[in-house]
Structures are given as structure tokens and as C-alpha cells.
Image (cartoon, grey):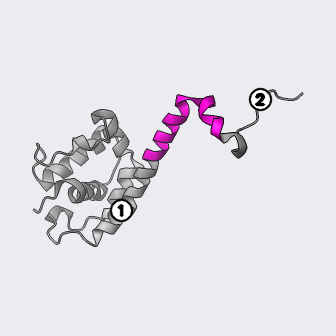
Amino acid sequence: MMSSKPAPPTPDHASGLHKQRGLFSAVSAFRAFHAFRASLLPTLLVCFVGTASAQVPSIFKEADLQLGAELIADNGCVACHQQKFGGDGSAIYRPGGRIASAGLLRGMVEQCNTTLNLSLFPEEVTAIAAVLNQTHYHFKD
């Protein structure tokens, strides 16, 4: 017995796909764009490693920035921050706010680790905090 399911869209009628799926395709495209953007984070941060300031807080001296960037992407940090704070999620990063030192920044990442049960090792928490320091906070020591 033959199935009555419609054939999947082909390139010759793909332009009508948005009419078939409506809002779903817009939401899918939006999510795909943000996933793509998040996937670029590790690459961009590796590029910045070579241009980083020589003054790095002692707590972050041995931190693996590439590992930190990968952990941020793998653990969905950006998506969680977007859900909690709206927009692109960057509203959580307030260098003039209550996170006033590199140690407090690392402590906040540890709090996320504990609260969300991420099971990160201490050096992984430090790596994430070092990336956040490099991209948002810029603590010197």
C-alpha cells in the first residue's frame, strides 16, 4: 500500500517552503543562526589569544582559553543567558556590577557549575572565567 505523505520539498519548489511552514521556518532559521554564531566563538577567541594583553590576573595565568570557549559553547551558556536575561544574553555581563574581581568572576562561574550540575573540573571553571574576563570584564589582577 502506498503512503499518502507528500514528497519532501525539492529545490525547484523550495521558494514556497516558507508558506508551508510559516513561523516554524522563521524560528528554525533564527535558531540555526544562533547555533552557527555560537559555533564561531571558539575560533574567534583563539584568534584573540595572540592579541591578548600581557596583564592577566594570576588566577587565569595557566587557563586554557580555547578549552574555555569550547566549554561555553558545549554547555549552552549563551542560550541559558539569553533565556534568563533576554536579547543576546550579554546583559548578564556587567563589569561595573557586583563582579568586581577575577576571583569573584571565577566564583560566579563555579556557582553556575554547581547550580546547573555541570560537573566541570576546577581548571574548566577557571578556563571559562578566563574567557569571560578576556571578552567582557578585563580584570588586570
Cβ–Cβ below 8 Å for labels 1 and 2? no
Residue 37: % across, % down:
41, 51
Residue placed at 24% from the left, 54% from the top? 132
Magenta region, mostly helix, strand or loop? Answer: helix
- Indicate whether residue 22 is drawn in magenta: yes
Q: What element carries label 1?
A: helix
Residue placed at 14% from the left, 55% from the top? 102
- Where residue 70 sits, quadrant-wise, is bottom left
Residue 79: % across, % down:
37, 41
In the image, what residue type sits under mark 1?
A: Leu
Above or below, 1 against 61 in this view is above
- Where residue 93 sits, quadrant-wise, is top left
Residue sticking out furthest to the right: 1
Residue placed at 37% from the left, 56% from the top? 41
Residue 128: % across, % down:
28, 55
Residue placed at 33% from the left, 62% from the top? 45
